[in-house]
Image (tube, grey):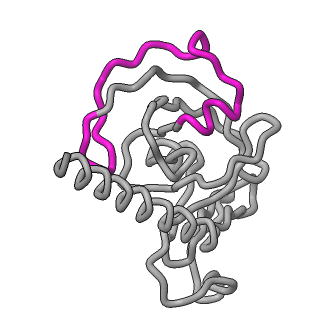
């Protein structure tokens, strides 16, 4: 009989967070020898997405990508054609899983988005209230802890980017 650790969240799991909050679950994990910050864990997303900062930071080249030509819709509602797809090993704690990232050549305040397929591959459960991802590792439960500071940085960047875009649109209309 195999032991399966229980993945659950308690009030103690909120320790270290400022409550109440509505922050996104933004984490750091490893890809190869790099600690990758500003990664959004989004249960609502169906695809793992990589943005240009991560692509360049990992020193990836166009030849590393395989074709992926299905258009995706971004947070801003615009349709974007991906540059390609790449499979990379992602390490969270002691667990490593292979992830198929879709490379988007679009602005984002996140470096990547981890979606349901990554959570399922990790056999993980995430909680935005507790700002944690819990997953089994052998007979133990490991956790990936989100950063409220990084979540707030991403939110501020998004607001600035949106207001800059609106300012540009207003200027273009007046020309």
Image position of 66 with respect to 144: above or below: above
Q: Residue at 57% of width from left, 46% of height from top?
A: 111
Question: Magenta stretch?
Answer: 52-79
Taking the view exactly as shown, the residue that stands out farthest to the left is 173
In percent of width and height, residue 98 lies at 62, 32
In percent of width and height, residue 42 lies at 44, 55
From the viewer's perspective, is 103 left or right of 149?
A: left
Taking the view exactly as shown, the residue that stands out farthest to the right is 33
From the viewer's perspective, is 136 left or right of 72?
A: right
The answer to whether residue 134 of the structure is visible from this angle is: yes
Nearer to the camera, 39 or 57:
57
74 part of magenta stretch: yes
Q: Residue at 46% of width from left, 20% of height from top?
A: 84
Q: Quadrant of residue 82?
A: top left
70 part of magenta stretch: yes
Q: How many marks?
A: 0
In percent of width and height, residue 40 lies at 52, 55
Q: Quadrant of residue 83?
A: top left
Q: Residue at 53% of width from left, 62% of height from top?
A: 154
Image position of 3 with respect to 58: above or below: below
Q: Quadrant of the C terminus?
A: top left
Q: Residue at 69% of width from left, 64% of height from top?
A: 143
Image position of 69 with respect to 92: above or below: above
Nearer to the camera, 51 or 9:
51
The answer to whether residue 1 of the structure is visible from this angle is: no
Taking the view exactly as shown, the residue that stands out farthest to the front is 175
In percent of width and height, residue 166 lies at 28, 57
From the viewer's perspective, is 24 left or right of 71?
A: right
């Amino acid at each position: 009989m195999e032991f399966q650790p229980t993945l659950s969240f308690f009030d103690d799991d909120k320790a270290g967070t400022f409550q109440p909050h509505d922050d996104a679950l933004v984490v750091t994990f490893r890809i190869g020898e790099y600690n990758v910050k500003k990664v959004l864990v989004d249960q609502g997303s169906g695809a793992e997405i990589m943005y240009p900062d991560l692509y360049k930071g990992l020193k990836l080249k166009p030849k590393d990508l395989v074709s992926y030509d299905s258009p995706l819709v971004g947070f801003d509602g615009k349709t974007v054609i991906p540059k390609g797809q790449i499979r990379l090993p992602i390490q969270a704690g002691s667990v490593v899983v292979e992830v198929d990232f879709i490379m988007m050549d679009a602005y984002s305040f996140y470096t990547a988005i981890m979606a349901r397929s990554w959570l399922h591959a990790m056999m993980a459960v995430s909680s935005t209230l507790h700002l944690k991802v819990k997953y089994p590792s052998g007979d133990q439960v490991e956790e990936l802890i989100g950063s409220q500071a990084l979540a707030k940085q991403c939110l501020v960047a998004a607001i600035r980017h949106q207001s800059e875009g609106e300012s540009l649109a207003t200027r273009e209309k007046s020309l």
